[in-house]
Image (spheres, rainbow, N blue to C red):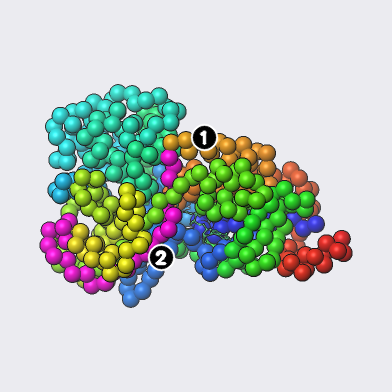
């Protein structure tokens, strides 16, 4: 029987997993067959760049935060090192009680950098500054304790600093709320003062040799396109939605497709969001499907607006603006894309990206395009302190965009890991589990690929894996499959 690994989901996680599998097999001199099944017509998932008329719009992510250099290594290996560009500006502004305040990027740095950033901002009172600076030098709750971002930050740095400066930043990135999201699941390194200090030191040591925050000059889709290009022809099968997966089928992992075809893989790497993976496993593995469906997601709308550069001089400090709860703003955050990155728009246009997160009774996904354009024009006007007349506006709705690592998330991931130990032929990876950033997805894809490969090697002799690319059908229509079973 031919041995193959099937990857489901062609976002950055699935593509990196497929790439890592092919690389590992080549290193061993094997020719492993990998199929990657992607439901949409183009791979890339949330990474979605549009280039038109001199504009480069990132409709999904636009920044790679890469403290440990994992994404940098992959990008360099793919031959894209020359495409890396770094931000032109740093820091951000906070909109609180309808006033704008500058905050330098040191706010997330070492205690000394944090202290400087705290003392420099006028966003909080003097007593809150002293409390926050003091907090940097006192121990927070025990590392390893599951506690919300809000509870952890308020106890360590004080209410005012936490509510105005930290929670909107730490929870807002995930489209969630500080009271619900787990500090342990999202920021374990910040809970361990020694580890945080080590990370900060590491960052400054590496700073000269490689950037920590960057993007790609032609957009982040360059990364997913390059990953696809590096895979053997016919590996990526697009426009193919998986309907169900049975990891305990007698012949291997059975993958049924929505078009009636099916595939048997020796091992399956499931790189779809948790809510989708839950549906795929609902019949065969209801228990693990239950754990997966308990991971909730928040939705968001990204509104990209082009306005004249004569507004440039009115743009507040930093790369963008983060709103606190009390600002009454419907935009949670906005980025000045064309000021943050080179080459995002024609010279005369200031490009901004605004995020409108659903939740708290607001469902921006249901607003009409015109309604969203009006909200954004009015709120940008408020930030720029002048009437804004956009040259164009682009609306992208993301249903179930951000996995919410709520309290208890680490326990759920442990259960999924236990399931993987018992079923090494099925690996779950992606933004839903061990970090939602692109860097975390790359790391998780590489972890899953390693496990998938060793699971395959454990069960098969290497000769069995060294199959010809053209040997035998692995993608069977239901008729072919029946025939095959009858002949067996
Ligand atoms: C608006 C937005 C902004 C973001 N900004 C940043 C940022 O600046 N920096 C950062 O690091 N991260 C950012 N993120 C997060 C990051 O983009 C994602 O976490 C990451 O891209 C997810 O990759 P993934 O491969 O795990 O999942 P996805 O990209 O969701 O890929 C999953 C793939 O599976 C496919 N699929 C689903 N179901 C099936 C099925 N049944 N059969 C076949 N295929 C299926 C989907 O079509 C999709 O292509 C942002 C996310 C969003 C939404």
Q: Which residues are magenta?
A: 381-406
How many discs appear? 2
Q: Is residue 62 left or right of residue 432?
A: left
Give the residue at x 21% y 50%.
328
The image position of residue 237, as x and y in percent, is 61, 66
For this rendering, which residue is in front, 473 or 373? 373
The image position of residue 389, as x and y in percent, is 18, 69
For this rendering, which residue is in front, 104 or 211? 104
Give the residue at x 32% y 35%.
150
Residue 177 within the segment the image draws in magenta? no
The image position of residue 247, as x and y in percent, is 69, 49
Kindly indicate the quadrant of the structure image that contains residue 395: bottom left
Asked if 161 appears above or below 391 in the picture, the reply is above
For this rendering, which residue is in front, 249 or 75? 249
The image position of residue 357, as x and y in percent, is 33, 53
Q: Which residue is mark 2?
A: 49
* Quarter of the image with the C terminus in it: bottom right
């Amino acid at each position: 029987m031919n041995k193959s690994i099937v990857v489901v989901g062609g976002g950055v996680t699935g593509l990196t997993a497929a790439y890592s599998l092919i690389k590992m097999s080549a290193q061993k001199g094997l020719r492993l067959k990998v199929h990657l099944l992607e439901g949409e017509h183009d791979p890339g998932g949330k990474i979605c760049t549009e280039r038109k008329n001199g504009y480069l719009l990132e409709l999904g992510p636009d920044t790679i935060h890469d403290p440990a250099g994992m994404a940098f290594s992959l990008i360099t290996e793919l031959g894209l090192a020359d495409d890396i560009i770094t931000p032109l500006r740093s820091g951000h502004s906070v909109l609180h009680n309808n006033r704008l305040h500058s905050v330098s990027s040191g706010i997330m740095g070492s205690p000394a950098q944090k202290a400087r950033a705290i003392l420099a901002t006028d966003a909080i009172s003097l007593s809150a500054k002293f409390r926050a600076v003091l907090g940097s030098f006192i121990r927070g709750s025990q590392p390893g304790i599951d506690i919300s971002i809000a509870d952890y930050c308020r106890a360590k740095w004080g209410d005012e600093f936490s509510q105005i400066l930290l929670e909107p930043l730490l929870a807002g990135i995930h489209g969630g709320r500080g009271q619900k999201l787990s500090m342990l699941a999202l920021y374990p390194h910040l809970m361990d003062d020694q580890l945080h200090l080590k990370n900060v030191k590491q960052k400054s040591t590496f700073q000269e040799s490689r950037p920590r925050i960057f993007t790609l000059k032609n957009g982040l889709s360059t990364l997913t396109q390059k990953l696809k290009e590096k895979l053997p022809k016919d590996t990526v099968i697009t426009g193919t939605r998986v309907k169900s997966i049975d990891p305990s089928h007698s012949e291997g992992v059975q993958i049924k497709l929505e078009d009636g075809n099916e595939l048997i893989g020796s091992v399956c790497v499931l790189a779809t969001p948790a809510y989708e993976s839950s549906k795929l496993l609902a019949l065969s593995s209801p228990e693990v499907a239950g754990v997966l469906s308990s991971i909730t997601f928040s939705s968001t709308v990204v509104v990209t607006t082009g306005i004249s550069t004569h507004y440039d001089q009115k743009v507040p400090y930093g790369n963008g603006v983060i709103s606190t709860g009390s600002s009454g703003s419907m935009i949670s955050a906005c980025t000045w894309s064309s000021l943050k990155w080179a080459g995002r728009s024609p010279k005369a246009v200031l490009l901004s990206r605004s995020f409108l997160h659903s939740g708290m009774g607001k469902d921006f996904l249901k607003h009409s395009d015109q309604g969203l354009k009006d909200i954004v024009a009015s709120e940008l006007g408020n930030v720029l302190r002048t009437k804004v007349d956009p040259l164009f506006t682009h609306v992208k709705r993301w249903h179930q965009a951000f996995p919410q690592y709520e309290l208890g998330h680490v326990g759920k991931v442990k259960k999924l890991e236990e399931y993987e130990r018992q079923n090494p032929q099925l690996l779950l990876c992606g933004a839903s589990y061990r970090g939602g950033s692109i860097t975390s997805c790359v790391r998780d894809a590489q972890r899953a690929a390693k496990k998938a490969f060793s699971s395959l090697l454990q069960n098969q002799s290497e000769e069995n894996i060294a199959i010809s690319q053209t040997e035998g059908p692995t993608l069977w229509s239901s008729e072919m499959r029946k025939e095959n079973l009858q002949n067996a």
